[in-house]
Image (cartoon, helix red, strand yellow):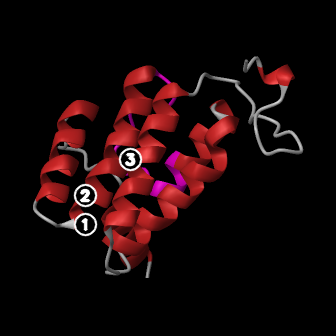
Amino acid sequence: MRGRVTARRRAQAVLAADDRRTADDLRAAADAAAAAGDWAGAVAERFRAVVRALEERGVLDERPGRTAHEAAGLAARALPAVAGDLARGGDRFDDVVYGHRGATPEDDRRLRDLDAAVRAARVGQVPAVATATGGPSASDGAA
């Protein structure tokens, strides 16, 4: 049984040990998949780009074999402003890659939005508090 768990865990890795592509390389692969209408490939490569970018920024250590949920959970501690988005991105990655569920252009858009939000997030930045009108509050520094 132990061998099966290890094999399953290895199969669920976001980035393989021999995958040396940069975040930009992975984004290009996601863009190419989306252009070809391969929404599942676009979602998978975009989430991989998010994880690789977090490694490149030093938010995550480089660790082949890390699962989507491990990456999202660790990154959420450093980037609480995007914690929920990271968790949802990890869920969608798992659904598409390991659950063999289809993906849509909307899924691609959400992962693109996640990538942009993670790139903009700063370590320790907390989520913006919305006002009664739904916009950022003055304490957020938004003007």
Which badge, 3 or 1, comes first in the chain's sequence? 1
In the rendered view, tell whether residue 10 sits above or below residue 127: below
Q: Is residue 73 magenta?
A: no
Residue beneath label 1, please?
A: 39
Residue beneath label 3, please?
A: 112
Q: Residues within 10 Å of mark 1 (few under 14, many from 20)?
A: many
Q: Which residues are magenta?
A: 58-71
Q: Residues within 10 Å of mark 2 (few under 14, many from 20)?
A: many
Which badge, 2 or 3, comes first in the chain's sequence? 2
Count the numbered circles shown. Answer: 3
Is residue 20 something one can see in this rendering? no
Residue beneath label 2, please?
A: 42
Q: Percent from the top left, x then y, of residue 140?
A: 78, 23
Q: Percent from the top left, x then y, of residue 23?
A: 28, 33
In the rendered view, tell whether residue 80 sits above or below residue 112: above
Q: Identify which amino acid the numbered label 2 is placed on.
A: Ala
Q: Quadrant of the C terminus?
A: top right
Which type of secondary structure does the marked residue at label 2 adopt?
Answer: helix
Relative to the observer, which residue lies in front, 10 or 76? 76
Q: What is the distance, in whole Å, between disc 2 and disc 3 at their CAs?
A: 9 Å
Q: What is the distance, in whole Å, between disc 2 and disc 1 at their CAs?
A: 5 Å
Q: Percent from the top left, x then y, of residue 15?
A: 30, 49
Q: What is the distance, in whole Å, between disc 3 and disc 1 at their CAs?
A: 12 Å
Q: Which residue corresponds to the image point at 69% horizontal and 37% vertical from the top-left?
A: 80
**Label annotation for residue 56:** none
- Whether the residues at callouts 2 and 1 have beta carbons within 8 Å, the answer is yes
Q: Which residue corresponds to the image point at 38% horizontal and 55% vertical from the top-left?
A: 109
Relative to the observer, which residue lies in front, 70 or 89? 89
Q: Quadrant of the N terminus?
A: bottom left
In the rendered view, tell whether residue 120 sits above or below residue 141: below
Q: Identify which amino acid the numbered label 1 is placed on.
A: Trp
Q: What's the magenta bit mostly, secondary-structure-wise?
A: loop
